Structure formats: C-alpha cells, structure tokens
Image (cartoon, rainbow, N blue to C red):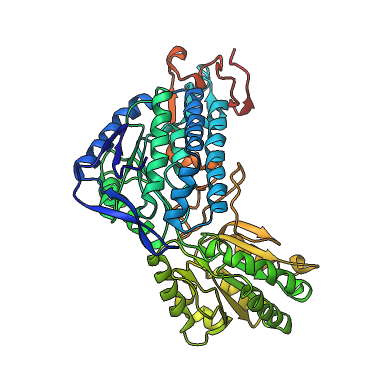
Amino acid sequence: MITGKNYIGNLLSSVGEITFTTFNPKTNLSNNHTFVEASTVEIQEAVALATKAFDTYKNKSGVEKSVFLLQIASEIEALGDKLLHVYCEESGLPLARAISERTRTLFQLQTFAKLVKEGSWVAATIETAQPDRKPIPKPDLRKMLVPLGPVVVFGASNFPLAYSTAGGDTASALAAGCPVIVKSHPMHAGTGELVASAIIKAAEKTGMPNGVFSNLNSSGIQVGIALVEHPQVKAVGFTGSLSGGRALYDLAAKRDEPIPVFAEMGSINPVVLLPTAARTSSEKWAQVYAQSITLGTGQFCTNPGLILGVKSADLDEFISKLSSEILKVAPSCMLHPAIIGNYEKNKETLSSQQGVKVVTSASGAVKENYARQTVITVLGSTFLKNPTLHQEVFGPFSMVVQCDTVDELREIIVHLEGQLTGTILAEGDDFKKYPAVVEGLKTRVGRIIFNGVPTGVEVCDAMVHGGPYPASTDSRFTAVGTASIKRWVRPFSYQNWPNSWLPDALKNENPLGIARFVNGERTTKSIG
C-alpha cells in the first residue's frame, strides 16, 4: 500500500506541508497518489535515528548483515506485481524492463550478502610485534576497514530500482555497516515507498536497530541540501546529472567537516571505429550501435553518445548505414516530460552548432513524451574547437566525429572530459597499428571495451563503473560491483591492542576464517 508518507526509521510520518504527485509519461497524466515532502523536523529525526542506529549496526557481524540483506531481497520479491505496476506507471518503462531491473536489484543484494558473510572484504592486515628489533622495537599493528557512519543515498531518475531505494548504493552501504537515509526520487516516489516498506520489514524481522534505514520524499532540492549539510551524515551516494552531482560535492566540501560525495554523473562514452573495422565491419557495427543508442530510449549513463573515426568512404558507409538502421527503431517513451524537454533542448543546441550536420532524425507524428532518435556528424577540427559539442545529450542521440587523421582522433581523445567507458572497434592489425589511440583512451575512462557496446553494466568483482571527473567525483572508486563497498569505509589500525579486545577479523586465532595479510603473506591461518 502506498501512503505517500516518509519512513522515519520504522514509523510513517507526514507532518510537512509540501505535497506532490508522480507522473505517467505514457498516459501523459499525473498518477493518483499524493506524496508529502519531508519536513525539517523529519530530516532531523531520520538523521538522529541513523546516528543512534550506527552505534549498534556497525558492530553487527557479517553473518547478521548478510541475513538482513537477503531478507530485503525476499521482501522486495514478495511485493510481486504491485511493485512492477507502480514502476511502469511512474517511469513509462515497459514491464520487461521492470522485471529485469528487479532481478538485478535482488542480485545486488544477494551478492553483497555473500560478500559480507564470507568476510575477507575488510582487508584485515596484521604486522606482529618485534620487541627485539634494533634500533627500535616494532609495535604490533592490525588494520581493517571500518564503516564511516550514516550515508545519504539519492535515488536515480533512470533506474527506479537498481540505482535507487534498495539499489547498489544502499546495498553496499548497508553491507559496509552504515545506516542509510534515502532521498527518494520524486519521479518514482511510489516505487520508492514500496521498496522502503520492504527494507523496513526486513530490518524488523532480522533485529536490526530502528533507524538503520529511512526514506524521505522530496519534490525539490531542499531536502537533499539539508541532508548533505547535516553534521551527522558521513558520506553521500548520487547518480544523476553533472550539475546535481557537482552541487552536492561543493556543499559537502564547504561543511565544517567535509565528507565524501561519490557521484556518478554525465558521460558520452566515446566509441572509436578504427580503419580496418570501418572497412570490413561497418554494416555490422551500424546495426549493433543503432540498437545500443536507442536502448531504453537512450536513458543510460553508458549510452554511446560519441563515435570517432577517420574520414573515408568506409566511414561514410558506416554513417549512412547507422542512419538507416536507427530509423528502423520505433520511437519510445522517455521517463518524464522534463527529461524529454531537456533532451529536445540539448539536441537542438548541439544540432545547431556551426559545422554540424544532422544526418538522420526520426520524423512523423509520435506520442507525447516519445523521443525521436537523432544522429549528427561533424569534422574533428570543429569538435576540437567547440566545447559545447562535448556535452551529454541524455536520450537516443549520438554524434559521429570525422577526423582527418588518426593523430587528430587521438588528440580529440586525450582532450575529452573523463568518461565512464570507452570502446575500441578493431579488426585485423588495427590494434597493433594504433596503440597510442588505445593508450590515450585508457587515460580518460574507467572501463574500456573491445568490439562491443558500452550499454550493460555487469555486477561483479571486476567491474569499474566510474571514471575521471566529471564521469565521477573520485575515479578511485566504482559505483557498481562488490568493490563499491569501499566507498563507505575507512582504514583503521589497532596498535599493541590486547587480543581479546580486538575485533574477530584481527584476532590471533582468526575465528572468522577469513583471508588476511599477516606479515606480508596472504593466509587464513591463525597466529600461533
């Protein structure tokens, strides 16, 4: 049942005066439920509860946290078709996408449950004492990762489940031992409340402290600002626009105690079509990229918004084929009128720049809030001189840049802003002939793809979903995969501490049986 209220810990609350509704972009009508924005009092209560909960939750064992995370997954699954219906109603996305995203959300929770149950992720490192060392004795030092404290997570507009209320940020923060306060995204507040109810049920059933999770509604920016500025909040997770992520980052930096903001922001995900691949495989790649550019109406952070190649008849053929293939894809619905409004505005801005040619754009009548896919092209020299052309267009849009030479192509790459992904399309001896292109691309991205598409982010140990600024605010971390847990922890050392008072991960007998570094050697053995 959707109440429109905020979850302040395990209590529903709606004392605020600001209300709003969600919107169905397919029907072009507001949905029925009314949501109450969190008040200042409710924000303070949520943070106070999270701070108190942290005292208990940070000491929960990996097994206890694992049970909690698995129970969240079970409770989300138990929401059944109701969750899927509200998801589609609030996003305009198809049922198949809702099912797929729910599956991914459950998998993320289950993956972190497995990680913390095994326990080695805490990176326990032990250097035993050498009291007889000359000229000075060596103390006993034992280090491990410990949670930061209450974390604020901002729900993402384009992933109502996998990057929102119980998405990757929340799952990894809870796994790390941090209470979470979600600032629910106003476009899918109903989906958020349903998922929040599942998390609260799981917390109660598994004996987690009240305040380990809260969910706050907000139609504007004030709730988010208040949360980021609150002195008891210790970290922030955000997926969204460059302007939004940068604003939060700046707010956090200005606090008396600055805190990390792990923001995953814009990316145009450059794709490099090398000459041999253009000559031998242009038709194949045009077909593949027509599908990738329009997947999910282009509303993925890994959408291929920039394709680079060297001017030739082969590249002309690729552009022609891409233009015809992308028109075969039926226009589809975007998430919200505001999003398609920005799409049309940004598309027009880039398309109207001097030297830009629109090579294809879907024409004819389309339903309200349905996006027309578009491909433009420009010369490499023009792209280099015009920073406006580097901007992301969030939607089914891509730009093909025609470079005079491979050297110009490489110059473009090394002058790009940071990106989440980069892709190399190569055949034959391309890879051997153009190593500087590959090396240049590696400096600008967090993940490099060979003969594939950037759309699709695997949740696993080896994934990096991040990159140099402005793709993310800290390229040392990933927002997807098990390594994302490292955003919510810090290293902590015990020196000459009595064995019985140490956490289990650092005790001589290694009661958890985890892998540890002991005097420079990775081992599961106890210290005799």
The total number of labels drawn is 0
Residue 50 found in image quarter: top left
Whether residue 521 is visible here, answered yes or no, is yes
Q: Is residue 367 above or below residue 128?
A: below
Name the residue located 52 percent from the left edge and 59 percent from the top edge: 300
Percent x, y of residue 339: 41, 65
Farthest residue toward the right? 428
Q: Quadrant of the C terminus?
A: top right
Q: Quadrant of the N terminus?
A: top left
Residue 462 found in image quarter: top right
Percent x, y of residue 113: 53, 31
Q: Is residue 117 above or below residue 445?
A: above
Position of 79 with respect to 329 (left or right) is: left
Whether residue 160 is visible here, answered yes or no, is no
Percent x, y of residue 524: 62, 22
Q: Is residue 518 above or below residue 479?
A: above
Question: Looking at the image, which is closer to me, 311 or 2?
Answer: 2
Name the residue located 43 percent from the left edge and 69 percent from the top edge: 340
Q: Is residue 62 above or below residue 358?
A: above
Percent x, y of residue 53: 33, 28
